[in-house]
Amino acid sequence: MPMRIGFIQADAAVQNAHSMLMDRADPASPLYGQHLTATAVADLFAPADEAVEAVKRWVVESGGVAADRVSLSANRQWLQFDAHVDEAELLLQAKFYSYEHIQSGVNVTACPEYHVPAALQQHIDYITPGTKLASYGFSDGVKALGLRRRENDTDGARLQRRTEQAAATATTKATTAGAPWVTGGCDEFATFECIRAQYGLPVPSSLSKVTPVSGNQLGIFETAGQHYSQDDLDIFFSYTAPEIPDGTKPELRAIDGATGPAATQDTAGAEANMDFEVAMPLVWPQKTVLFQVDDEYYENAMTSGSGKVKGIFNTFFDAIDGSYCTLNAYGQTGNCQDAACIDPVYPNPNGGGQSYQGQLMCGTFKPTNVISISYENAENSLPANYLRRQCLELMKLGLQGVTVVVAAGDNGVGGHAANGGDAHKGCLGSQHDIFAPVSLASCPYALSVGATKLQAAAAASKGTFVEVGPTDFYTGGGFSNIYPTPDWQQSAVATYLGRAKLDFGGYSGDTVQENSGTNFNKSGRAYPDVSALGSNFYMVYRGGLAKGGGTSVAAPVWAAVLTQVNEARLRANKTAVGHVQPVLYKHPEVFTDVVEGSNPGCGTIGFVATAGWDPVSGLGTPIFPKLRDLFLSLA
């Protein structure tokens, strides 16, 4: 039977990698911008040669396994070998059985217990097959079959979208000859003219003769049954971005049997449409990449409430980083099959025409320089170490120069569904009054993006509108219950907590604490980092005009902004910006501060916007010319 012995991920390796990232992200460091290759990053987490040799020697000498049958995995995370049952039992001083789950018919080889020499326990995290029956739902209905000496032959994803179907329809491109696209101001209908003017982004005419930088496409993550409509994109661009030719589409990088665009216009997903309708014109003539993740069986399961799948990001990380498939970190190895954090399994054992029967994709695709994600899980909906492992992957991507831009959520401090009349829905604690942060937005290696709206008052003297916190939804923001406040954020957070007049207090630590009057973890990673327009975005959805909104608009706006910054840096023979927060927090002058707004939830008004950074709008909205020039001034 195939066996694996996984090595413990040393805390020192994680700290070393973090320090290396900070050296490459700190604008004052001589190593700024000197990103690592994927191989070099994987090597940072490899066990010491001495540990590998000690464990291999034990396998050979105590189990009688020939040395030439024992090899180290490509990412140096585990030893692998095929063993006869008697060899495995001798090695581990254990008795193996085949366990059958009566309801499902699933068979798993495992042992009630096994033994590892004390001197090796510091190196070994897990051994498979082992004792972990709970992973397969074997809490009951189990029967053991003696194995004689022979070889053994989400809560669901949250989509940050808000669409309101308009009365008008735009079923064919011929309708572009009719009435104007919009009749109100930017505060009512946020078009690309509004967004470009607000943030100083380049207009299409200035880019008409520009050749996009090779390899700098903007990547956009989609899952949970969300598929864009090509017909909708064509109609939308004919109105708002005529410079984009009819039929232009993102490059599809389909992961684990995923399918790309919607089969018909009336099955289009609002989230997918909005992501690409926002991003494609803002990066043009640069292109976009669609990372569509998981087969339709699992995509549908994410929103069905069936509980068949809870994780939504691991298979994506597997596909863009082969080492992640088997990365052992925080007691988590590979994709999760525990009931608390079920990830998709491939080949899909559920059968049917929507089930992908290929092998799990590991390192199949290269990550883009910027990746936009408009999906979330509540922090409390998944095990903390499961989320820490995902956050570690964002650190690894940052070391490679990749920026992961994540929507901060649309439910204020309540995490999930704080709107809709129940002020405590989605909140934590026995009284449902403790704030509920979301992931991946709470990971310190993600650029977390909040949303704003344009104030209805007259435009400011510089020709732009004043931005405030939205009130048709409440932008997500708050403090993590898992990750501590990072160094680059501590001063901004301390200033805010000292300045803001909050009617609730905070606790400290990495677990929820139910103390009277304390609603949030004041020692946690605070988010969002930045913000952008997220209200009244006019879009085409299923052939009709619609208003979209949420941090799902704001995140791809920021992703497009950073893609344009990377275009400038790459043309200047510099590297992509990578992990940007250490630069951004040192340079508030590249932002327009947002000083009005709040994010209610959990029976409170939530946090309030103030001068400087705050957990409603972050550092503020971008001033693109200053932001671009700042990054061009760096090495």
Image (cartoon, rainbow, N blue to C red):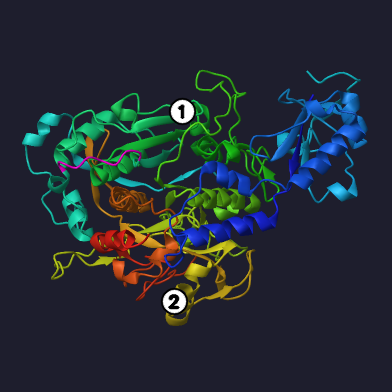
Q: Residues within 10 Å of mark 2 (few under 14, many from 20)?
A: some
Q: Percent position (x, y) of residue 622?
A: 29, 61
- Image height of 28 relative to 173, above or below: below
Instruction: Give the spatial CA distance, label 2 vs label 1.
Output: 43 Å
What residue is pinned by disc 1? 258
The residue closer to the viewer here, 357 or 224, is: 357
Q: Which residues are magenta?
A: 208-215
Q: How many numbered marks does the figure carry?
A: 2
Q: Percent position (x, y) of residue 502?
A: 46, 77
What residue is pinned by disc 2? 496
Lower sequence index among marks 2 and 1: 1
Quadrant holding the N terminus: top right
- Residue 541 shows up from this direction: yes
Looking at the image, which residue is at 44% across and 74% down? 492
Q: Residues within 10 Å of mark 1 (few under 14, many from 20)?
A: many
- Residue 209 belongs to magenta span: yes
Decide whether the magenta segment is chiefly helix, strand or loop.
loop
Quadrant holding the C terminus: bottom left
Q: Is residue 619 left or right of residue 331?
A: left
- Image height of 393 relative to 529, above or below: above
Q: Is residue 598 left or right of residue 97?
A: left
Q: Of the residues shown, which amino acid type is indicated by label 1? A: Ala
Q: Of the residues shown, which amino acid type is indicated by label 2? A: Tyr
- Image height of 152 relative to 412, above or below: above
The residue closer to the viewer here, 418 or 483, is: 483
- Residue 630 belongs to magenta span: no
- Residue 502 shows up from this direction: no
Q: Percent position (x, y) of residue 211?
A: 22, 40
